[in-house]
C-alpha cells in the first residue's frame, strides 16, 4: 500500500480523543502515513497528540462548544469563531492534501468536516455514544460511512442504511497481564480487583460514596483490592489510609487495569463503556446526569442489557447500594462474548481502495 496522507479531528475530551488514538495506533501497525491532526487548543488532544504520534502536523483551533439551550444569544459569537476557523482549516487541508478525513466528533469537527466537504475530501465519522452528538448529527450527511458504537444509534442519523456501520467504539489495546498490573500497584492476585474512576477529571460524588464504602468494607473485614482514580490530589492522599486502596489523582493508562479487573465502578463515558464491552468486564455504572442529551444514561443501559452493567442513578447513590451491587456483580456469571475488534471493522471500510 502506498504511503497515505491522513487528516484527523476529534477531541476536547478523552471520550473523543482516545478512539482516535486506538485507530491511529492500528493504522501505524498496518501502513506508513503522514498525519495532520486538528485539535482544540489547550485540551487533551492538543496536549497529547505530538507525544502519542511523533512527527504529526498539529493544527490547534481556538474553539468552544455551543451553549445550552442552543437558542442562547451567546452562541452567535461562538458560531462566528467556527466560521473563521473553517478558513484556517481550508488552508491547512489544501496544503496537506489528505486522502481522507476521519472525525471522532466534538465541536472541533464542525469547521473541519465542513472544510473537507468543500474540498471534496472523503469524510468518515465515528459516534461513540448511544445518543449521537449535535455536531455528528449535523455533519452525518457529509460522511462516506458513519460508524456507530451502539445499535440504537442508527435511528439518530438520517442516512441510507448502507452508510451506517455498527463498529463499536475503538479502544486502546491492553499490554499487560493481570499479574503484572496487580503487582505494579502492590496487590496480590488473591482477592477481587476493583477499579474506581469518575471520568478523566474524576467525580467528587463517586469519591465520597466510595470512601464511605471503604469504611463499610473495613468494618465488615471484606477482602477486596481497589485502584481508585480520584481526579483530586487531596482526596487521593486521604484514601491511602485504607490498606486495600491504591489511590491516585490521575492514572496515565487505566486501560490495562480495566482489562484485567473483576469489577469497575465508574461513570458511563463512552470510552469506559467500550473498554468494558471489549474486554468483557463487569461494571457498576453511575451515569453523570449533566451529560448532553443525558447520553450517559443510555450508554449505561446499553451495557446493562448485555449483562455487564449494574446501573445506579446518582440521585439513588449510597455506599450501601454500592456494597450490595459489588457483591451481586462479583458473583454474576456472564455469557458475554466480546465482538470483533472495532478498529478492524472501521479500517476494513476506510482503507478500501474505492474509499480513498
Image (cartoon, rainbow, N blue to C red):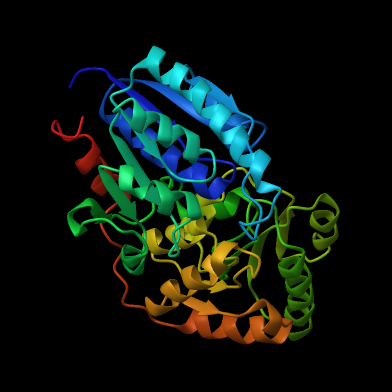
Residue 318 vs 191, above or below: the answer is below
Which quadrant holds the C terminus? top left
Locate residue 281, reporting x and y percent.
44, 67
116 relative to 218 in the view: left or right: left
- The N terminus - image quarter: top left
Q: How many marks?
A: 0
Left or right: residue 266 versus residue 244 is: left
Which residue is at 64% across, 70% downward?
289
Looking at the picture, does residue 270 appear above or below residue 225?
A: above
Towards the viewer: 339 or 60: 60
| Most foreground residue, 347 or 234 | 347
Residue at image position (26%, 30%) is 30
- Which residue is more in the foreground, 240 or 60? 60
Relative to 316, does residue 83 appear above or below in the rendering? above
Residue reaching furthest to the top? 95
Residue 212 shows in the view: yes
Residue depicted at 20% across the width and 42% down the height: 348
Q: Position of residue 31 (x, y in %)?
A: 26, 25
x and y percentages locating residue 346 in the rendered image: 27, 45
Instruction: Note whether residue 190 is visible.
Output: no
Amino acid at each position: 500500500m502506498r504511503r497515505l496522507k491522513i487528516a484527523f479531528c476529534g477531541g476536547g475530551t478523552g471520550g473523543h480523543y482516545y478512539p482516535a488514538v486506538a485507530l491511529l495506533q492500528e493504522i501505524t501497525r498496518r501502513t506508513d502515513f503522514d498525519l495532520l491532526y486538528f485539535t482544540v487548543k489547550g485540551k487533551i488532544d492538543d496536549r497529547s497528540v505530538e507525544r502519542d504520534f511523533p512527527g504529526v502536523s498539529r493544527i490547534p483551533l481556538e474553539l468552544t462548544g455551543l451553549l445550552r439551550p442552543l437558542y442562547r444569544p451567546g452562541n452567535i459569537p461562538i458560531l462566528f469563531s467556527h466560521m473563521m476557523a473553517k478558513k484556517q482549516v481550508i488552508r491547512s487541508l489544501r496544503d496537506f492534501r489528505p486522502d481522507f478525513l476521519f472525525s471522532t466528533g466534538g465541536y472541533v469537527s464542525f469547521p473541519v468536516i465542513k472544510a473537507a466537504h468543500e474540498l471534496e475530501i472523503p469524510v468518515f465519522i465515528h459516534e461513540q455514544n448511544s445518543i449521537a452528538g449535535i455536531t455528528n448529527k449535523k455533519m452525518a450527511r457529509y460522511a462516506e460511512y458513519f460508524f456507530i458504537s451502539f445499535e440504537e444509534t442508527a435511528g439518530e442519523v438520517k442516512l441510507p442504511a448502507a452508510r451506517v456501520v455498527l463498529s463499536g467504539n475503538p479502544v486502546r489495546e491492553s499490554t499487560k497481564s493481570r499479574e503484572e498490573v496487580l503487582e505494579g500497584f502492590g496487590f496480590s492476585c488473591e482477592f477481587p480487583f476493583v477499579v474506581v474512576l469518575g471520568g478523566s477529571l474524576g467525580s467528587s460524588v463517586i469519591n465520597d460514596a466510595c470512601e464511605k464504602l471503604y469504611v463499610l468494607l473495613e468494618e465488615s473485614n471484606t477482602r477486596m483490592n481497589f485502584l481508585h482514580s480520584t481526579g483530586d490530589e487531596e482526596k487521593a492522599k486521604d484514601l491511602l489510609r485504607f490498606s486495600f486502596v491504591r489511590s491516585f489523582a490521575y492514572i496515565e493508562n487505566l486501560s490495562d487495569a480495566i482489562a484485567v479487573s473483576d469489577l469497575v465502578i465508574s461513570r458511563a463515558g463512552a470510552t469506559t463503556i467500550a473498554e468494558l464491552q471489549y474486554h468483557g468486564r463487569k461494571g457498576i455504572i453511575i451515569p453523570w446526569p449533566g451529560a448532553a442529551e443525558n447520553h450517559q444514561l443510555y450508554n449505561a443501559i446499553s451495557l446493562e442489557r448485555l449483562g455487564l452493567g449494574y446501573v445506579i442513578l446518582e440521585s439513588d447513590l449510597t455506599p450501601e447500594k454500592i456494597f450490595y451491587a459489588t457483591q451481586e456483580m462479583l458473583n454474576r456469571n456472564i455469557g458475554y462474548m466480546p465482538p470483533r475488534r472495532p478498529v478492524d471493522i472501521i479500517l476494513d471500510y476506510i482503507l478500501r481502495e474505492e474509499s480513498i
